[in-house]
Image (tube, rainbow, N blue to C red):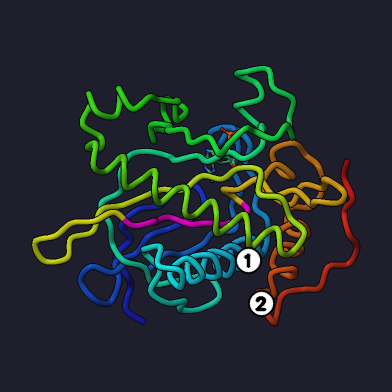
Amino acid sequence: MARRKKIYEGKAKILYEGPEPGTIVQYFKDDATAFNAEKKAVIEGKGVLNNRLSEFFMTGLGQIGVPNHFIKRLNMREQLVRSVEIIPLEIIVRNYAAGTMSKRLGIEEGTQLPRPIVEYCYKDDSLGDPLVTEEHIAAFGWASQQDMDDILSLALRVNDFLSGVMMAVGIRLVDFKIEVGRVFDGDFQRLIVADEISPDSCRLWDIETGQKLDKDVFRRDLGDLKDAYTEVAKRLGVMPKTAAPITKPTLIN
Ligand code: 5GP
């Protein structure tokens, strides 16, 4: 088989040149990292689950008209996506306080926020993805005002969609992170959702028990990450046929 050209290797994914111009093959690794890669592990099967889950969310978003990079799944670990010019921002939407917001503002984790709050972080691992304001974004030219309007609209639409899908399977969408990229269609450019949407980039809590079903299981040593992601995939009906069944539920309070 011909070797593909690797474009980029990140913490959880590898990007290869796609078969057609303007396409990329996105490969999901089993690597889990946290705290800016200070904590690392290989969680066998995580990549397969995230490939499926990201496909599920991106396909659903496409069906309700939220533009995104997903084209098709290629195999257990790879999907074909549109190549984008990534905006160097992590766009975080929060419905309940948790994580850095709780730390920064002293709000107890799990407190419902008065409305969804959108935050922006500058994508730079060497700086630890610092929180920035729209002033920084405009002044440093990372995105235009029109881009910011589009990003806010995309982020809130993704939030409404994901919250509903999760609620239907008994999961609370606490918060999530998306990335957005620019694509060029002839003379027009527009922004679309890119990267991935998976339990690596969301906080997902069981509505009844509060059990964490996301990467905090790894960050905070709360149990078996694969079991948590498998539970999400199983509830959403996107469990890969070959994935091992869950042996026991990990109940964490
Ligand atoms: P926090 O700012 O509380 O650490 O994270 C808020 C949300 O964004 C969480 O759902 C978290 O998983 C996600 N998030 C923030 N930064 C990153 C990142 O660098 N990578 C990934 N995958 N998710 C992130």
Q: Position of residue 223 (x, y in %)?
A: 82, 47
Disc number placed over residue 49 in the picture, else none: 1
Residue at mark 2 = 240
Q: Main secondary structure of the magenta part?
A: loop
**Image quarter where ligand 1 lies:** top right
Res 33 → quadrant: top right
Q: Residue at x 48, y 36 (%)?
A: 118
Q: Position of residue 154 (x, y in %)?
A: 40, 51
Q: Residue at x 48, y 57 (%)?
A: 196
Q: Residue at x 38, y 24 (%)?
A: 133
Q: Which residues are magenta?
A: 192-199
Question: What is the C-alpha distance between the residues marked 2 and 1?
Answer: 7 Å
Up the image or down, 223 lies above or below 241; here it is above
Res 1 → quadrant: bottom left
**Which badge, 2 or 1, is on the more N-terminal residue?**
1
Q: Position of residue 243 (x, y in %)?
A: 72, 75
